[in-house]
Amino acid sequence: EPEVTQTPSHQVTQMGQEVILRCVPISNHLYFYWYRQILGQKVEFLVSFYNNEISEKSEIFDDQFSVERPDGSNFTLKIRSTKLEDSAMYFCASSGQGLGIQYFGAGTRLSVL
Amino acid sequence: GQNIDQPTEMTATEGAIVQINCTYQTSGFNGLFWYQQHAGEAPTFLSYNVLDGLEEKGRFSSFLSRSKGYSYLLLKELQMKDSASYLCAVREGDYKLSFGAGTTVTVRA
């Protein structure tokens, strides 16, 4: 069964450093998303991406964050100058249609020290 | 803004039925989703409702009433592996899913 793949599964970084979280969406999907879940809290939407541009973003997704589809298979989330409060599980999701079901990857646990 | 409410915890016995309620107040509505999430894992899609009524999928069913801003997920013939968090999520516009805090279901032997 096709699945969304995320790497790494766990990323540890020092405060102020930049990190790149990587995702390989389901191969025929065209819509991509990033969500985050701070430990013990609800899943929060960050951004959606379609046709090589951001289609929607939340208030959380400020200038510290950026997304990119560098090639035909990868979708990345870059977090610049990480802060302690960026520590969370980051989930990538993809859907075949804009109003389709979003399928989630296993997540990357980001720990900012 | 959005407000999506669901109970924090529920406990049930193996083989029993559990109903998880979700109420929502959102600025728009373009479908309601239920996901299962085991600790430390990804949310896994369970069901989707966009019209009023009941959607049945094996042991899991989901109901929606848009006029009441209400949905429930029904889990039948509970198994130990059903112990997990169940997330109610509303799509308000074209893309973003807004999630509730999740209901942790514990299945006892």
Image (cartoon, coloured by chain):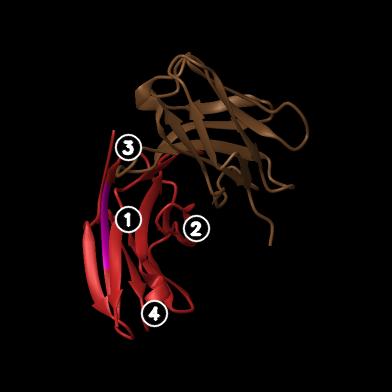
Chain colours: A brown, B red
CA distance separating discs 3 and 1: 13 Å
The amino acid pointed to by label 2 is Thr
Viewport quadrant of the C terminus of chain B: bottom left
**Residue A44 % position (x, y):** 39, 37
| Residue tagged 2 | B44
**Residue A35 % position (x, y):** 47, 37
CA distance separating discs 2 and 3: 25 Å
Q: Which chain carries label 3?
A: B
Q: Earlier in the sequence, mark 1 or mark 2?
A: 2
Residue B79, which numbered label?
4
| Residue tagged 1 | B66
| Residue tagged 3 | B27
Q: Main secondary structure of the magenta part?
A: strand
Task: Please state which of the two labelled residues, at mark 4 or mark 3, is closer to the viewer.
Answer: 4
Q: Which chain carries label 2?
A: B
- Residue at image point 52% right, 44% down: A107
- For the record, the magenta segment spans B20-24
State yes or no: residue B21 in magenta.
yes
Q: Mark 4 lies on which chain?
A: B
The amino acid pointed to by label 4 is Gln
**Residue B18 % position (x, y):** 28, 75
Q: What element carries label 1?
A: loop
Q: Is mark 4 on a helix, strand or loop?
A: loop
Q: What element carries label 2?
A: strand
Q: Which of marks 4 and 3 is nearer the N terminus?
A: 3
Task: Please state which of the two labelled residues, at mark 2 or mark 3, is closer to the viewer.
Answer: 2
The amino acid pointed to by label 1 is Arg
